[in-house]
Amino acid sequence: MKLKLIYAAMALTMGAASLKAQQVPAYLDQKQPIEVRVKDALSRMTLEEKVKLCSAQSKFSSHGVPRLGIPEIWMSDGPHGVREEILWDSWGNAEWTNDSCTAFPALTCLAATWNPKMSAIYGKAVGEEARYRRKDVLLGPGVNIYRTPLNGRNFEYMGEDPYLASIMVVPYVKGVQSNGVSACVKHYALNNQEVWRGNIDVELSDRALNEIYLPAFKAAIVDGGSWSIMGSYNKVRGEHACHNDLLLNKILKGEWKFDGCVITDWGGAHDTKEAVLNGLDIEMGSYTNGLSSGKKFAYDDYYLASAYLKGLKDGTYPMSTIEDKASRILRLIFRTAMNSDRPWGSFTNEEHYTVARTVAQEGIVLLKNEADKKKGAVLPLDASKYRSILVVGENATRRLTEGGGSSVLKVKKEVSPLAGLQAKFGDKIKYTMGYASGKPVYDREMKPGFDTDSLRKEAVKQAAEVDLIIFVGGLNKNNFQDCENADRKSLALPFGQNELINDMLKVNKNIVMVLLSGNAVEMPWIKSIPSILQAWYPGSESGNAIADVLTGEVNPSGKLPFSFPVKLTDNAAHSFGTISYPGDGVKEVYKEDILVGYRWHDTKKIPALFPFGHGLSYTQFKYGKAVADKKTISGSEELTITIPVKNVGKVKGKEVVQLYIGDEKCSVLRPVKELKSFQKIELAPGEEQTVSFKIGQDALKFFSETAHNWLAEPGAFKVYIGSSSTDIRSTVDFVLN
Ligand code: BGC
């Protein structure tokens, strides 16, 4: 009776067009605009039901409204594949047998493609896997800025440059969401280290916040249209980021007009009042430390559960807060779980493996290849030249999709580097481990189950007997390596790899180096090794993609999304003592301010081992002279800059033509130059293309602390176009009136 009355009242208020609402309530009617559905659903819900929406009911799901048939929201990590099913109320593996996924390359590898088309196919494919697995929210992508090479989670992010990360994150988000699965961009914001991540209070200037740390989040929300976002664990200016007035109310929901859901990181909520008032919508993982300990089935004790309901009833909190949160959550549900138009998804199919392989092939970076040196092997490898090839290194056989924390993947297929090389070189390949680490255990360092001395001796013995050594090392997903919850202890390669490399070099100089990691490492042996490949964590097709590049079937075209410093103190965050990194346990001050990554190396004239944007090819590209269509611009005028680029080598290849801009004279300190545009082009041998860029005033602006806004100061600017941030091939000057 009551329902009938409501339907009749609705039909009256909504006019003749919605007479249909008499049969189908508007919230269930897919044809109704989403806001009509939200309003209708809200009008039918009790206060208790609305509050329930705001918190978890299990480790990876939040409540629906069972009485009205409004489904729960199911979430999963993210960001490189869809995580295995987890138990209802604890972190154990649920031991399903249908949840082994495709592992896509880690996000550093995706960023290293410098190709937004790669982000688009990646996002679509990982979204299809999430959809097939009945997920509504995929917990990714991550876009925290690469501030220090010690950060254990850099591999889940898109590098040190806000422009590159912004361009790359948008197609990922759109691709995922084309499946009716929400992306959940994370960790908003300033979770740039794992040490003390739960409580460290980050202090930084408004300028650094706006110029460096927020743009990629803004792009994901404003340009990508992400339906949800995950708050980070740390504090920002005294408040936890998961309920932070500045980040959530003022910037995200105010300036950026975000209409979606803010979800906590797991265990990231700490206070009911702040959670209610400071922009949080869904609380996940509380009373679990974000990880493992805490009271069982404590969902009613969540900050946004019973305590919130009580506060609403006794007038402590305004009803507008729950109306807003419930609207946002319903919107998310209508966009995902209750979107009957969404496709069905697909899982571990050949198409997804092709995506994984293509992204890996384009992301792998050729760091060094000194073809003119007589000593040592150069790439690509000519199989006919070698009778025996020794593959050395644990990473040649180790599953690198395991470990690393929440981005851990249970995969159906992972082609190891050794298997990939065997597929190309057959019996010529021999393998010895050389070094060993322990099992990947999230919060502990495990001892290797091998005698490391004998491993090394055996490798050196075999190294002396072969034509060529392919060393496959780097970091792994162990605690204190590329792994959540802790940072690396140093920039050095772990597990005795440097000693092993040095010992092998004494008996055989023909070493090709393949590094798998999500972070920069120190390379004390660099002068002795002519060819080095940075292969990241390439996922299911790891070995195939690496072998494709080593043999030249694929010409490498990846470019570094972050700088590799020579030594740790060459990195900006590590140049100001412990208060700047990792902080004093309570607080941390980003003293380097806006000079992050190459902005620091350039401005302070500290050469990097390998600079931002660096990456070689098996061919060579000749850049002509850059030309601008005007000498001055004013107002909303755009500058068009063109530059011819020619493939002058012998093979087809892709090049990332990078455009940086420097403000020659400014009332505030500005970096020498900043990335403002790039294009990835493909050229056949002898082919030339004129690349054209358009530059508007936005590319010239800095965030002014005094005006609290973006400003471009009139005066001289310089455009730098090149093949990396330091390999500049042509410059053009112009003036902003
Ligand atoms: C991580 C998040 C992850 C969540 C759920 C947290 O520990 O920081 O990135 O999505 O766990 O697994």
Image (spheres, helix red, strand yellow):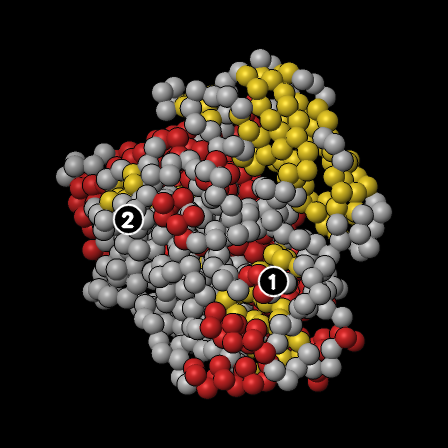
Type of amino acid under label 1: Ile
Q: Residues within 10 Å of mark 2 (few under 14, many from 20)?
A: some
User: Which callout, 1 or 2, points at the residue further toward the start of the chain?
Assistant: 1
Whole-percent x, y for residue 692 in the image = 72, 32
Q: Quick check: 698 above or below 594?
A: above
As drawn, the label of residue 578 is 2
Which quadrant of the view contains residue 344? bottom right
Front residue (pair 538, 228): 538
State the SS at label 2.
loop
On the image, numbered disc 1 is attached to which residue?
Answer: 532
Residue at 28 percent across and 48 percent down: it is 578
Image-quarter location of ligand 1: bottom left
Q: Quick check: 181 above or below 417?
A: above
Residue at 55 percent across and 51 percent down: it is 610
Residue at 74 percent across and 32 percent down: it is 625
The answer to whether one can see residue 115 in this image is yes
Q: Quick check: 24 above or below 504?
A: above
The answer to whether one can see residue 3 in this image is no
In the figure, is residue 264 to the left or right of 662?
Answer: left
